[in-house]
Structure formats: structure tokens, C-alpha cells
Amino acid sequence: MEPGNPKKKNDLVAWAHSKVPGLENLASFIRFLIERRLIALFMLAALVLLFFFWNYIKVIIVMVFFIAIGTVSMLYNRWIKVSLGVELIMVGLVVTSVSFGRLPGLVVGLVGLFLAEVLSERFTYSTFVSFIGIAVVGLAAPNIFHQADSITSTGIIMTIIYDAIIAPGYILLGSNAGRTALFIVTHIIFNIWAFSFIAPAVYGIVQLL
């Protein structure tokens, strides 16, 4: 707008003070809603669902988030064939189990691991050993948290229990002892870090939802 052009200035002022179509008064607003009843009904239904079912929706959102993060965190195995214990499935599993119960936690852990192994093209019969470890962690995490009263301590304890379960299982099924040891060592180190720095913040956010 040119500083010295009064016509343009007046046009801008007129536009700024003009009524928004459909919102001039109550009658026009009702007519606006009726004309767009599908959008209005959808928004109303969404608000009702959020109001009455937020606790359930919240759990589903958190579960989907942790499944996605856990799956993505293991996709490097598709290209890197070294057995490293770097993954975020354990964090999602423990936080979900402690926050919402054993069943949601089991779903996060089992589905996340299943998708990660399939997408990484690493799914074998020995993978079922990891499923057993996931199941034990999902079932035991709430009890451990009740005793430890710390998401960090719970996560580290659960990681050690998980590795204690899967290590002999994989070796019995023919896995190389050196590769298994490398996985266990890196898995414990990574999860000590993850449960010390990532899990407390994530757990705190989940509790605020």
C-alpha cells in the first residue's frame, strides 16, 4: 500500500471492518452451520468422542507412537548386519506397561518387534525367543515399577531380565556366542542411557496427557 494513497487505505479499513460472511449474526451463523451440516456434525462427533473417550484415545495414540518409533529404531538392521542392541522398543514397552497396563505394553512390544524384524528382513524362528523376553518384560514391568518407583530403575532392571532370557535361548538355537555377547553388552549400555535420559521425559509427557 502506498503511504500517500487514501483510497487504498480506506479500502483496507473498510475490509477490516466488514462482516465475515455467515457470521454477521446468530441467525446467519445457524444458517451457516445448517448449510455445512456435514462438517458441523463431524466436528461435533469428534468433540464428543474426545470428551467421553479421551482416556481410550490417548492410550491408542501413545501405543501407535511407540510402535512406530520402536519399529523405525531397528530398521538399520536391514543394512548393518552387526548385532547391536540399539533400539527403542524397550523404552516404549516399559513406559506403556507402567502407564496403561500389561496388555497395551505387550501390544507395543510385540507388534513393534514383529514389524521391525519383518521390515528388516531378519524374522526367523529364533525371533520367538525375543517375543518370550518381551512378554516377560510387559508382564513384570508394572510390579517392578511399584517396588522401584522409578522409570529409570525399572527400565534398566527389565533390560537385564530381558537379556538374561534371550541370551541362552539364542545360543541354544545356534546363534554365535560372540555376536550374542556383543548384542547383550550394547543393549544394556544403550538402555542404561535411554532410560536415564529419554524415558523419564517421555514418561512425564505421557502422564500429563
Image (cartoon, rainbow, N blue to C red):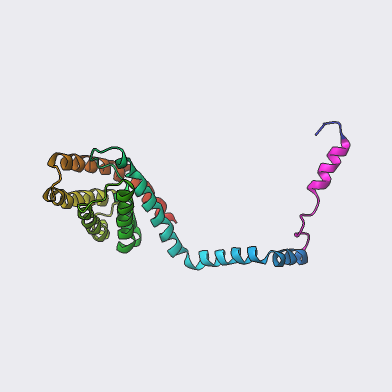
Q: Which span of residues is magenta-colored?
A: 6-25
Give the residue displayed 30% in from the left and 56% down from the top. Answer: 110
Image quadrant where one finds the N terminus = top right
Whether residue 200 is visible? no
Q: Nearer the viewer, residue 86 or 208?
A: 86
Question: Is residue 97 in the magenta section?
Answer: no
Residue 183 in which image quadrant: top left
Residue 47 lies, in percent from the top left, at 56, 64
Residue 200 lies, in percent from the top left, at 34, 48
Give the residue displayed 39% in from the left and 50% down from the top. Answer: 68
Give the residue displayed 23% in from the left and 43% down from the top. Answer: 187
Is residue 62 shown left or right of residue 27? left
Residue most extreme to the right: 7
Q: How many marks?
A: 0
Residue 62 in which image quadrant: bottom left
Q: Nearer the viewer, residue 158 or 43?
A: 43
Is residue 56 shown left or right of residue 23? left
Image quadrant where one finds the C terminus = bottom left
Residue 144 in which image quadrant: bottom left
Question: Is residue 24 in the magenta section?
Answer: yes
Is residue 173 shown left or right of residue 17? left
Residue 63 lies, in percent from the top left, at 38, 57
Is residue 63 shown left or right of residue 170? right
